[in-house]
Amino acid sequence: MELLYNFPLLAALFSIFFAQFIKVPIQFIATRNLDWSLLTSTGGMPSSHSAAVTALSTAVALQHGLDSTIFAVAAVYAIITMFDATGVRRHAGEQATVLNKLVADFNRFVEEAKVWPQTGKLEKEKKLKELLGHQPIEVFFGGLTGILLTLVLYYLFIM
């Protein structure tokens, strides 16, 4: 039951759920397309990874102070996570886009050259996930989401 009183953990988890949920209406406003799969997908606005790690860092700072060792660990963890979201994961998503195009072009070529043997449709249409990382603005707003939600939760439930 002590786990239910771990404010940094609860703030981080709440921020993840909030950031994932808010992606649906943001995407709807931008594209007029309601996509509930965003609740469980990576990438998009805002970054739930950034929201989680900044919420964790903010909650640790509120409980233990900015001069604590545990805040230093949380802050460095947040920086690494947010840097990774805009770097390695974003580029992996861009590579997945190129690979998916190559696969589509190859599949079209094969279909034009000869009739494909009778293979399953799922095998022909395998796609790599392209939305892996984040644009810097998505990471920024994810981080801002985590900080603001944690401050609201702290003043509502802790103080």
Image (spheres, rainbow, N blue to C red):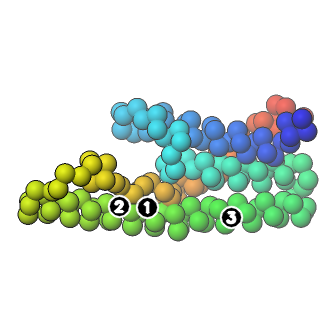
Left or right side of 20 for 14: right
Q: What residue sits 70% from the left and 54% below the top? A: 53
Q: Quadrant of the N terminus?
A: top right
CA gap between label 1 and label 3 equals 20 Å
Q: Which residue is mark 2?
A: 97
**Residue 116 sits above or below residue 15 on the image:** below
User: Which residue shows up at 31% across the image and 60% down it?
Assistant: 100
Label 1 residue SS: helix
- Secondary structure type for disc 2: helix
- Give the residue type that dot 2 points to: Thr
Distance from the alpha carbon under mark 2 to that under mark 1:
6 Å
Classify 106 as above or below 149. below
Q: Residue furthest front?
A: 118
Q: Residue 137's spot in the image, x, y percent?
A: 52, 55
On the rendered structure, is 15 left or right of 124?
A: right
Give the residue type at disc 3: Ile
Would residue 46 be visible to someone looking at this image? yes
Among numbered discs 2 and 3, the one appearing first in the sequence = 3
Q: Which residue is labeled 1 in the image?
A: 93
Q: Which residue is mark 3?
A: 79
Instruction: Tell me which numbered mark, 1 or 3, is placed earlier along the sequence.
Output: 3
- Horizontally, residue 48 falls left or right of residue 113, namely right
Q: Residue 106, percent across and down?
A: 20, 64
* x then y, percent, for residue 110: 15, 62
Which is in the foreground here, disc 1 or disc 3? 1
Given residues 106 and 6, the one toward you in this image is 106
Quadrant in the picture for the C terminus:
top right
What residue is drawn where x is 43% and y is 61%? 93
